[in-house]
Image (cartoon, rainbow, N blue to C red):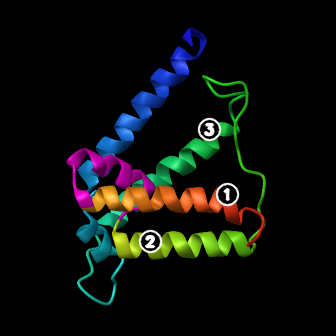
């Protein structure tokens, strides 16, 4: 446990910063997210700046990977190697997008929004967890 304390502290700090950023950007407001996802209705383009900032930071991180021998708090980088666009990827992406559009949440903001105590968010998170369990128990390898 003590050996992993730096990793745990870094994860807590990153998670807290991520949750704060989600709250500050408006990603915890399902109506705002749904407004962003509705370009033919009452479109709210403000979240494009959130998306742009996230992509820029991710790109900078991926560039840094090439200049580092290993991560600061781990022995190796965990970079996906599968580049195949297959049926499970397309089905999962579609389901994610449908859930995001209907519910106004994706997993990170939904977990952060639990702190508001809203029954709507609780139902969304429970449905998300049930979906994850169903996927892992019954669908892995069958799509």
How dense is the environment of label 3, judged by Cα within 10 Å: few (below 14), some, or many (20 and up)?
few
> Viewer-nearest of labels 3 and 2?
2
Question: Which badge, 2 or 1, comes first in the chain's sequence?
Answer: 2
Residue 118, quarter of the rendered image: bottom left
Image check: 61 left or right of 35?
A: right
Q: Residue furthest top?
A: 2
Question: Which badge, 3 or 2, comes first in the chain's sequence?
Answer: 3
How dense is the environment of label 2, judged by Cα within 10 Å: few (below 14), some, or many (20 and up)?
some
How dense is the environment of label 1, judged by Cα within 10 Å: few (below 14), some, or many (20 and up)?
few
Identity of the residue drawn at 51% across and 69% down: 96
Identity of the residue drawn at 77% across and 62% down: 83
Query: Pointer 1: what residue?
Result: 137
Q: Main secondary structure of the magenta part?
A: helix
In the image, which residues are magenta? 105-119
Closer to the camera in the image, 65 or 111: 111
- Placement of 87 over or under 106, stated as above or below: below
Mark 1–mark 3 Cα distance, whole angstroms, equals 37 Å
């Amino acid at each position: 446990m003590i050996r992993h304390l730096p990793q745990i502290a870094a994860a807590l700090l990153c998670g807290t910063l991520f949750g704060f950023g989600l709250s500050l950007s408006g990603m915890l407001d399902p109506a705002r997210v749904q407004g962003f996802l509705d370009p033919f209705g009452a479109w709210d383009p403000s979240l494009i700046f959130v998306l742009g900032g996230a992509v820029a930071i991710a790109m900078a991180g991926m560039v840094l990977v090439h200049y580092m021998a290993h991560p600061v708090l781990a022995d190796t980088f965990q970079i996906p190697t599968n580049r195949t666009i297959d049926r499970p990827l397309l089905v999962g992406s579609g389901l994610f997008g449908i859930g995001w559009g209907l519910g106004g949440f994706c997993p990170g903001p939904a977990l952060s929004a639990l702190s508001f105590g809203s029954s709507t968010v609780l139902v969304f998170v429970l449905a998300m967890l049930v979906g994850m369990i169903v996927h892992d128990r019954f669908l892995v390898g069958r799509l």
